[in-house]
Amino acid sequence: MTPATPTATPAPATADAAAPRRPARLLRHSLVLTGRSLAKSARNPGAMLNGVLTPALFLVLFTFLFGGSVAGSTDAYLLYLFPGIAVMGAGLSGMLSSGLAINIDMKKGVFDRFRSLPIGRSAPLLGSILADVVRYAVAVALLFGIGYLMGFRVQTDAASALGAVALMLGFGFCLSWVTVFLGVLVRDENAVMGFAFIAFIPLMLGTSLAAPVDTLPGWLQAWAGVNPATHAMDAARALLTGTPADGSIIRTLVWSAALLAVFCPLAVAAYARRR
């Protein structure tokens, strides 16, 4: 009798087949949790209102307080000020809401439930931040509406204006990971809010927001020169009003990528270790 030839059994393809689908599954799970976070915001819009009203107040007060002395007229100063305020709107919403919302959910045990589900480890964090991006977009859109009523007009073209908005939202998204890391790491929500607010003051006000950097004192010029928010404001100003970019767009993209590369893994690792 001829010995039976062994037939090769194919290796289980489950893991290999699942691997290409993992990014798609992570995105799908994150989008589901994004919807949950947006539903929460609809029921409790306080953080969203704060993210819009604060920069809107800065826009109105700075324009009429400093417009005549800094730029000679409120119209000219509004043209300079508005792009910086729009960047501040996205950054403020991210810095003061992202980490705080996650910290509150973790204290309530919501994230313990997420950890028990068959979803990606970073899906709850990513879902929360994607919801924040939607809130940033609403905040920036409302700021554009307020700026338009005050007399601001885009001086470039539609593509540049859309690029400016994308840059603001991307910068806010990457900056949010800093406070998400703090929100996961620190157990007290008041401490998270305190850290975020203390960081907000030098990060957003120690910039070219209210006046050109070369008019600032030397020590403040040194800080503004390395401040990522300064580069984001200068880049938005170039895209919206046509002023020279001087490399600010590239520097903003580099800073955004660096913030994301450093703080996203740190936040995910801290979330995995949280008990």
Image (cartoon, grey):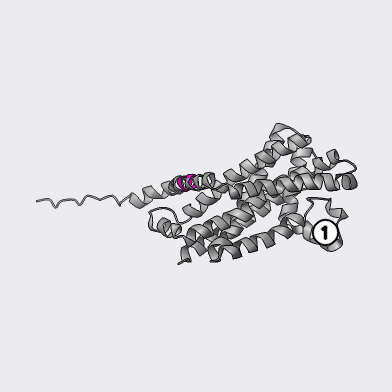
- Give the image location of residue 130, x and y in percent: 54, 47
Q: Residue furthest top?
A: 158
Q: Of the residues shown, which amino acid type is indicated by label 1?
A: Gln
The location of residue 76, given as percent across then percent down, is 85, 40
Looking at the image, which residue is at 74% across and 57% down?
Answer: 227
Q: How many marks?
A: 1
> Can residue 80 be seen here?
yes
Q: Is residue 44 magenta?
A: no
Q: Position of residue 117 (x, y in %)?
A: 38, 55
Most common secondary structure along the magenta stretch: helix
What's drawn in magenta, residue-wise? Answer: 30-35
Q: Which residue carries the number 1 mark?
A: 221
- 237 horizontally vs 189: left or right: right
Q: Which quadrant of the view contains residue 179?
A: bottom right
Q: Is residue 34 magenta?
A: yes
Secondary structure at badge 1 equals helix
> In this rendering, does residue 249 appear at all?
no
The crowd level at tag 1 (other Cα within 10 Å; few <14, some 14-19, many 20+) is some
Residue 221 falls left or right of residue 126: right
Is 38 placed left or right of 244 in the picture?
Answer: left
Residue found 48% across the figure and 44% down from its top: 35
